[in-house]
Image: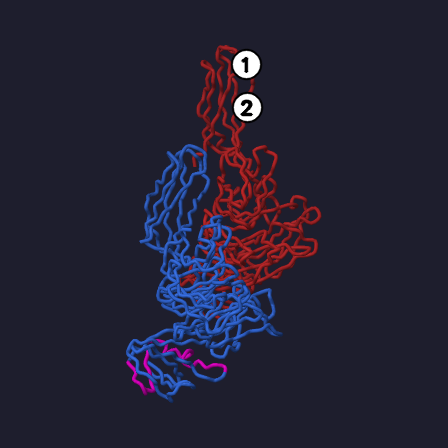
Chain colours: A red, B blue
Amino acid sequence: MAYENLNFFKPNMTFVDGYFYMFEDVHDVLLQKLDDGSTAFSYPLNTLLTTANVVTSLEHDGINFWTMQDMSGGVRIKRWQIENDVVELKETFEFSPNFDSDAFTVEHYHDTLISGSSSGATASGTVLYLNRYTDVVASGIKLTLGPNSSNQYEEVEVSAVNGSDIILVSGTQNSYNFGDTVNFYNHLWIFNNYSTGSLHKVDAYTGTNLNTYNDVEYDNITACTFARIAPVSTVDTLVYVKSTNLKCLNIDTLANYGVMTIDNIRVDNVTVLRVYDLSICGNNIYRLQKAATYYGVNYSWNYYNYVLSTSRRFLDTTSLSVYPVILPANGVNVVEVTMLVDDQYGEGIYNKPVFFTDDDPVGFITTNPAYTDYFFGTGEAVTYYKAGVTVDTVTIEATATQYD
Amino acid sequence: MATENIKLIKTTYQQANFTVDQGYFYTIDNQQDNLLQKTDDGNTSFSYPLDTLLADTSADAVRSVEFDGVYFWSLQNATNLTIRRWQIDNYVCKLQETFEYADGVSHTYDSTAFSVEHYHTELSVAASSGAGVVYFDSYWDDSSLMNFTTTSGDRLTLHLGPNSNGEEEDVYVMTTVSGGATVSGTSGLTISGTLQYSYAEDDPVNFYTYLWVFNNYNGTDSATGALYKFDAYTGDYVTKYAGGAYSSVSAATFYNVDSFADYGAVDTLAYVKGTNTLFVNVGSAGASLPYYGSMVMENIQSNEATVIPVYDICMDNQNVYRLQETADGGSSTWSYYSYLLSSLDSFVTSISLAAYPAIIAANTIATTDIVAIVKDQFLQPVTSRLVSFSDDDTPGAITGGTPINTDADGRAATIYTSGNTAREVKITAVVAQV
């Protein structure tokens, strides 16, 4: 069938460094797949999954893989890590009763050192300096340092944060230089369908529920992830699919940075297609689905495949209006023609050319092309049509093009 | 069918086992009570009757066979797990030893994969009859091997020969010396403390140490598996290593593999898990066993979802032979088992191709970065190989150059410039194995 790619047979997926990953409970392996579905590699799980409890959501925080499975009365979230060609289970958290979830993610951050760290500094009080996320780091968080120039990694625990000083419980075993990578995670975010819906903020180290945000908005969420994207400005955001919208949540205020429309809907514009999992890399948004709509045609698949969206602003909808819509056919009168061009976030496109045409042999568009609003983001491109001399219905067409 | 070759009988797992030696494939048939020597095309080149009959049921079928250079070892997963050691002697396959493992309070056994840890070297100096010292090319400086002691207290046994007269014998390692070991005759041989026969330089020296059994139980716990280590001389339990990765393993072997740059040639226990073969460092101390590496194979159906079972595995030179009932990439099963090949030589195995961004405007101006990552079967980057990019759109085109060489990370990048029709554009990257 057309447009198939991954052919995943389990409803979980994450994308890391050019490869798609899936936890498979039949052979108990983590599969590393290519875009066309072929297997690049596989890693045996050293702790077996229960086939009855398929992994329903998969996340990657830069170091660890996180899985969610159903269990009696709730869900089970596990943290895994590839070690020596095998996937080792590192942690298991169980959430029950009153948990019914299809989607979760782990709040995670990727940073770099802005100073070096020497090896062998085993005494407590070793200080690290991060480039961007010092204000997110807190006592008890474990930072994964590396790789360094020798391809070494290590995990260190934060004792305290004092201004820009990140003080470690102990020193580092290896040496790290300016610019070496630092990864860490802090919270799990779980969408709970129980009752009328809620979003749980959980300590990712202890599994302790820190906050519950009850809102029907968080009901029936089937896919989410945590990513650094640019819906408005570049932000770290909890991204989740709600119906045909992809929402970017500010985890501090629970307001939306932005909401973008996605095309997970049948041609009938009624039937919403389920998104089973979600992964974001750069501007690319990968939605795991069993059906999709491409260029006005419905497709259904036997297996799960990814469907693409983009987080960068892209011309998405246009709306053409004319004021007034009736004018004399005298070759003199003019009407104002307004083309409204929005992106997938429902916001006006800035300064993009719009080309207008009409089908009257005498009437004509006075300014062509017209550009969408440059200053206020209204997305409006305004021009004028001067009437012809024959009484008729005139069709005006406008074409907006994405040029970047 | 075209891809069938050795055609081993599937019914009731009658010949669901094989091993390879010097171009011949061997299988033990529990219904014919024969060790069959087959050629690549399925013809039986020879057969050796078993001097001890096996029961004919599917439960008693031999599910794995291993060859250690001297002996054939078989595994049966019936009421008891049974491992037998056989040797071809005077045109008959004679049973040398039987180890039976019954379920008990501490252990439940369910296994279809095992191997014997075995080593091969050659005499570095000719040894005359009556000599008390033999010198061989390798392993003499491996104290953990040379100091091997069975659970009954016996020292490591070396199998010398055959010599030019077809003579061979077993000797104990007593102490090691530089470049070799002092030996004495095993009990039951007529020699006492010295070699019975003379051997030339380069005559073979073989020895084995442990049996490694992939059990679907860790003790009596079926929630995970375990790799069991048994003394190959006494059959006694030595230890076990728990791990889900050891569960549901259907094929394993032991071989000297030279595919890992960081280690050189290593003697490793290899087993199939899903679509990968993993190479265990059995010589490592500690509570768990590390891996030298892992290798992806192609035992997956055309739907890229269904893993094709591997019933047995063996290696010869750089060839990996997998016993299967379905061809790689196929979906229908054969009437017989045949082998499929993998290679221990590094080969281009996968090309990850991604576009950043993956959605661009169809305006003949917008561009996207196309990144290909080329890896071999060990997931190591394939460097300095030309990757050719192409697309199926007109006037869309690859404008960033093609072909492009892979870098140290196996990456090759180019640029695609869009066409003028909104559609899914297929970009293809091709790299040649040189």
Q: Nearer the viewer, residue A44 or A234?
A: A44
Work out whether residue A169 can be spotted.
Answer: no
Q: Using the numbered discs, state the Cα–Cα distance from disc 1 to disc 2 in whole angstroms.
A: 14 Å
Give whichever of discs 1 and 2 has the lower sequence position.
2
The relative height of residue A174 versus residue B145 in the rendered view (above or below) is above
Numbered circle sitting on residue A327: 1
Q: Residue at position x 48%, y 32% from top? A: A374
Numbered circle sitting on residue A321: 2
Q: Is residue B148 magenta?
A: yes
Q: Is residue B199 magenta?
A: no
Q: Report in which chain the residue with disc 1 lies.
A: A
Does mark 2 fall on the same chain as mark 1?
yes
Amino acid type assigned to the residue bearing label 1 in the image: Leu
Q: What's the magenta region?
A: B126-151
The relative height of residue A399 versus residue B43 in the rendered view (above or below) is above
Q: Secondary structure at mark 2?
A: strand
